[in-house]
Amino acid sequence: VSTQSTGEKVTKVIEEIGKGKNLKHVEETHDKSAPLIEKDVHVKKIDRTGFLDEVAKPHDLKHAEVQDKSVPHIEKDVHVKKVDRKGFLEEVSKGKDNIKHDS
């Protein structure tokens, strides 16, 4: 059981941080951040000019029929009504006991 208060412990830690710490000098580093590539692996440069030239040429494209399913689907019998926010916010500001609930 420690007799120091939390404030005393914090003060002690802050004082230790303020003193600093002597660090050892590093003579040799071992940088392992580079990707490990095996010695028998060879990376070739590929000439892509032919491919890029082909892509840059104009092409005749065929029309495609698509069905956009990203649009929200709302049933035909669903009706969206405008909410009277002003009236609602006035009710909320009066207090939660006075709010009228729609059934």
Image (spheres, rainbow, N blue to C red):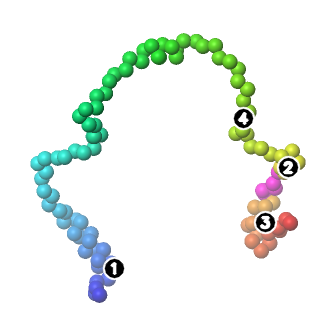
The Cα atoms of the two marked residues, 4 and 3, are separated by 41 Å
Lateral position of residue 59 relative to residue 10, left or right = right
- Residue flagged by tag 1: what amino acid is it? Thr
From the image, tell me which residue sits under label 1: 6
The Cα atoms of the two marked residues, 3 and 1, are separated by 47 Å
Residue for point 15% across, 58% down: 23
Q: Give the mark nearer the N terminus: 1 vs 2.
A: 1
- Residue flagged by tag 3: what amino acid is it? Glu
- Residue flagged by tag 2: what amino acid is it? Val
From the image, tell me which residue sits under label 3: 91
| Relative depth, front residue between 13 and 77 | 77
In percent of width and height, residue 102 lies at 85, 65
Q: Residues within 10 Å of mark 2 (few under 14, many from 20)?
A: few
| Relative depth, front residue between 65 and 31 | 65
In the orientation shown, which residue stands out farthest toward the front?
40
Residue for point 64% across, 13% down: 60
In percent of width and height, residue 55 lies at 52, 16
From the image, tell me which residue sits under label 4: 68
Q: Give the mark nearer the N terminus: 3 vs 1.
A: 1
Q: Give the mark nearer the N terminus: 4 vs 1.
A: 1
Q: Give the mark nearer the N terminus: 4 vs 2.
A: 4
Q: Which is more foreground, mark 1 or mark 2? A: 2
In percent of width and height, residue 65 lies at 73, 26
